[in-house]
Image (cartoon, rainbow, N blue to C red):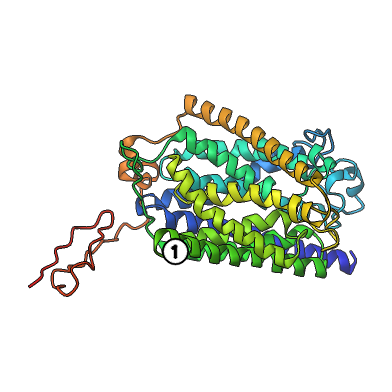
């Protein structure tokens, strides 16, 4: 093995490990944004989903996605129970089977593992959107089907040599393949499951249900931020210094501006700089830059992040008004900004900005052709994922059931589904404010589950 292959392999595997570490970020963000009574359930879902997706992708998903076949799906190299690498002994037999990814010079299993952690991310996106009311076993079954069949087929269209890639569709690191697929699947789950008990009143008012641990959510956001530095630059699948450096800065630029703009917008709209919205603004910017990080200039990455921050805030508000109960904002972050980021390629792609950028978008003289291809990809992937997800959710609902009982939901899924609690010795201590007398308006806002405060004025 020459030095270049060695360096490429080390780079790809390091980035794959960073992407794998994002599972901790998702688990932390989701559990922090949910109520304490459902913490074990959310952590357990995020813990087990990678194992489930690994099996599905190993036995069938990989072959459907990267196996040679037709424009719709891979038909060769399916159900491999043992694999290969690039060694002379067995590598030749597989060169004609996984042609779409033969451009990457790293060993076979390095390619497989890098793509595997992306597959796991798509399933994890669904977890947060359907949190606090879905049956544990139902989520496991859906995740298996998503990673076994749904994700790989869309992946084949775009990354596996399928019909969209043949048209020139651009999605560098998974704005559609990962984030939109997970987002569409999450949307169908939210609709079919319905909202959490008490989220919306009979007269249509929205009852905020705050998460129990914003500190944990913030830690998770930092973990995801770090993981994105493997998610996007690692998609080069080679040690290309110029491209990696550009992608890294573009990724960070999209994220930081998304965070700042979302914070400013919610401050203006809601009157306070809400930390939860700042977190979702960061993630929205990172999602939006994902499909175009190798195709746009750094100033444009700042612009994309800014638009993503605005979308994040107003999408959360809009989904709430539509009574689509998403406890963590996954639809606003992954679906809305996955779509926006994908379309951004048709607007802002610039040929030659890195060695990987080979087309111009609308604002760089490319006309509307690329934008049309990007829109077609968004619509096609969305339609496919929605149809298969709805069928899967409904079959699960009619067979093993989809939603926990009312009693379990009220008491918490930790007890009903897992028989234990995340905080068995946790006691909520309420502070008495009876001694406060100087500012009668200071405590006029009473949060959910807190006792009314009496202000004694003399």
Q: Residue under circle 1?
A: 267
Give the x, y percent position of residue 151: 67, 40
One can see residue 120 in this view = no
Give the x, y percent position of residue 257: 60, 66
Query: Is 12 drawn above or below residue 311 in the view shown?
Result: below
| Left or right, 418 with reference to 424 | right
Query: Is 37 drawn above or below residue 298 in the view shown?
Result: above
| Left or right, 42 with reference to 187 | left
Q: Describe the element under mark 1 as helix, strand or loop.
A: helix
**Mark 1: few, some, or many residues within 10 Å (few <14, many ≥20)?**
some
Q: Residue at x 49, y 64 (%)?
A: 263
Q: Residue at x 31, y 57 (%)?
A: 424
Q: Residue furthest bottom?
A: 438
Give the x, y percent position of residue 188: 54, 36
| Left or right, 307 with reference to 447 | right
One can see residue 392 in this view = yes
């Amino acid at each position: 093995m020459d030095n270049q292959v060695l360096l490429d392999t080390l780079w790809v595997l390091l980035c794959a490990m960073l992407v794998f570490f994002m599972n901790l970020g998702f688990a932390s963000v989701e559990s922090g944004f949910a109520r304490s009574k459902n913490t074990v359930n959310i952590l357990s879902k995020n813990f087990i989903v990678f194992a489930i997706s690994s099996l599905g992708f190993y036995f069938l998903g990989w072959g459907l996605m990267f196996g040679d076949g037709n424009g719709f799906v891979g038909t060769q190299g399916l159900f491999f129970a043992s694999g290969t690498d690039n060694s002379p002994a067995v590598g030749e037999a597989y060169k004609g089977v996984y042609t779409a990814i033969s451009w990457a010079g790293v060993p076979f299993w390095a390619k497989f593992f890098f793509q595997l952690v992306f597959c796991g991310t798509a399933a994890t996106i669904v977890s947060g959107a359907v949190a606090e009311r879905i049956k544990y076993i139902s989520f496991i079954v859906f995740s298996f089907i998503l990673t076994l069949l749904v994700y790989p087929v869309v992946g084949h269209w775009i990354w596996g040599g399928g019909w969209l890639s043949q048209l020139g569709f651009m999605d560098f690191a998974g704005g559609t393949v990962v984030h939109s697929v997970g987002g569409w699947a999450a949307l169908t789950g939210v609709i079919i499951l319905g909202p959490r008990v008490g989220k919306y009143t009979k007269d249509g008012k929205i009852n905020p249900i705050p998460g129990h641990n914003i500190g944990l959510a913030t830690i998770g956001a930092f973990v995801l931020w770090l993981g994105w530095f493997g998610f996007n630059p690692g998609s080069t699948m080679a040690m290309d210094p110029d491209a990696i450096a550009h992608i890294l800065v573009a990724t960070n630029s999209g994220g930081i501006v998304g965070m700042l703009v979302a914070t400013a917008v919610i401050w203006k709209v809601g009157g306070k700089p809400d930390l939860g919205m700042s977190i979702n603004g960061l993630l929205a910017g990172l999602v939006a830059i994902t499909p175009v990080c190798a195709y746009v200039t750094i100033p444009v990455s700042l612009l994309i992040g800014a638009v993503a921050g605005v979308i994040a805030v107003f999408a959360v508000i809009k989904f709430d008004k539509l009574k689509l109960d998403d406890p963590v904002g996954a639809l606003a972050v992954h679906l809305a900004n996955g779509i926006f980021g994908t379309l951004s390629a048709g607007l802002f792609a610039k040929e030659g900005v890195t060695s990987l950028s080979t087309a111009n978008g609308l604002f760089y003289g490319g006309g509307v052709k690329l934008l049309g291809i990007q829109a077609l990809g968004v619509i096609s992937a969305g339609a496919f994922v929605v149809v298969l997800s709805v069928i899967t959710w409904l079959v699960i609902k009619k067979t093993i059931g989809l939603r926990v009982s009312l009693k379990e939901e009220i008491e918490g899924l930790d007890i009903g589904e897992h028989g234990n609690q995340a905080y068995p010795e946790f006691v909520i201590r309420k502070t008495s404010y009876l001694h406060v007398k100087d500012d009668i308006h200071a405590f006029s806002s009473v949060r959910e589950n807190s006792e009314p405060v009496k202000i004694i004025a003399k």
